[in-house]
Image: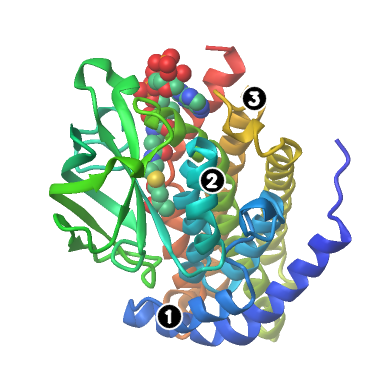
Amino acid sequence: MPFALTAEQEALRQMVREVAEKAVAPRAAEIDRTGEFPWDVLQVFREQELLGLGVPEKYGGAGAGVLSLCLAVEEVARVCASSSLILAVQELGLLPILVGGTEEQKQKWLPPIARGEKLISFGLTEPEAGSDAASIKTTARREGDHYVLNGTKRFITGAGVSDWYTVFAVTDPEKGARGISCFLVEKGTPGFSIGRHEEKMGIRGSPTAELLFEDCRVPAENLVGKEGEGFKYAMMTLDQSRTTIAAQALGIAQGALDFAVQYARERRQFGRPIAEFQGIQFMLADMAMKVEAGRYLLYRAASMIDELGIEERGRERLPAEINRFSAMAKAFCSDSAMAVTTDAVQVLGGYGYIRDYPVERMMRDAKITQIYEGTNQIQRLVIARSLLGL
Ligand code: CAA
């Protein structure tokens, strides 16, 4: 299907590229080294109104759509993967409300998220429930006009920094996936605390930690949508949010390719720039093919979601084609990012392996994109199931 960005999307890409070059790129190495969350970058994103890109205008957002959000994530990831995750996680955290919330909940919760006043994270994964997301053990017991949550969430991106969390918990253990519900839990709720912070290989400026619930009383009105529908909301969220991880991976790969091309032109060995050697040229050509192929797959997947109306994005299930395309984009772009960044390190040789140059950081950052929001093995399972109509 032919594909072109609109003038608005091109303008957004240009604007985010300038912001990323000016305010994010100079900070990227330091963010990685210190492992500190970049509050200054968050503030820039707020000022540029990037945190509500994926939120419909009706709920206080820019209504720019998923493809526009992906363009923004891609441009930021080109210079700093940790910072790009601020935009991707905001979308991931809010999507359960957008797909499952009542009209009243959307009106109440989405505007402050869209304005960036509230950061929101997604709490699904647990120590014993990663790929097998339906096997979560955190419970939510109804007690009068409250639910009481008990359990532990692990590997939660944005934990501690976020103000709000969409948390998945079992309300009826007899019903399996149909016994899971989703809750909006606010930071500071008694019984809710942040546990262990993980020391990670990459995306070091993005906090990853546990969420601990010990008799945490959440008002019943914070049940997102309907009881027992949480797992479905989580799956529908991931069907859409996986595009933003593909965008992050694509941006990392583009950043590594750009750097490798520039380096190959400048670095001289055997009396000439290494760009003149076919061994280098073929690597760069393969890297460029992976980046461009991933880009078209991703933009197609994102625009397919944008073609749906907001109501359709919250129905029983997204069309199988979208479920498949977003998994294909996520798996392809992240596998490509790993390959492209590894080759970028190779092009730079010994200099690629040291911290004076950004490609080793890009390689470490790329790895997680093959793992989170569903490992690439799970993506292949999703693609095959959709392809075979299972
Ligand atoms: N949309 C709507 N409903 C769906 C669905 C979808 N895409 N996929 C499944 N469902 C429904 C099914 O219809 C079924 O409902 P019924 O019982 O009413 O028929 C129910 O969910 C259970 O379906 P399955 O039996 O197919 O589920 P499963 O247990 O086999 O699991 C899975 C399917 C695809 C493997 C799923 O567990 C999965 O996606 N796992 C990966 C989890 C994941 O991606 N985690 C990421 C965490 S977030 C993160 O990483 C964020 C970060 O750090 C940035």
How far is the residue under mark 3 from the one under mark 2?
15 Å
Q: Which amino acid does label 2 sit on?
A: Ser
Q: Which quarter holds ligand 1? A: top left
> Which element type, helix, strand or loop, lies under badge 2?
helix
- Asked which quadrant contains residue 387, the reply is top right
> Which class describes the residues within 10 Å of circle 1: few (<14), some (14-19), or many (20+)?
few
Mark 3, ligand 1, within 8 Å: the answer is no
Q: How far apart are marks 1 and 2 (CA)?
A: 23 Å
CB contact under 8 Å: marks 1 and 2: no
Q: Where is residue 177 in the image (x, y as percent from the top left)?
A: 33, 22
Of residues 191 and 345, the one drawn nearer to the viewer in this rendering? 191
Which of the two residues, 39 or 369, is positioned nearer the viewer here?
39
- In this view of the protein, which residue sits in the foreground, 181 or 330? 181
Ligand 1 lies under 8 Å from the Cβ of mark 2: yes
Which secondary structure lies at badge 1?
helix
Which residue, given by chain and number where applicable, does mark 1 sit on?
A: 39
Q: Which of 161 and 184 is in front in this view?
A: 184
Q: Residue 108 carries which label?
A: none
Residue that mark 2 sits on:
241
Residue placed farthest to the left in the image? Answer: 214
Q: Does 359 appear above or below 176?
A: below
Quickly name the residue at label 3. 319
Compared with 201, 43 (above or below) is below
Is 21 situated above or below 152?
Answer: below
Q: Which of marks 1 and 3 is nearer the N terminus?
A: 1
In this orientation, does residue 377 appear?
no
Spatial CA span between label 1 and label 3: 38 Å
Residue at image location 54% in from the left, 21% down from the top? 384
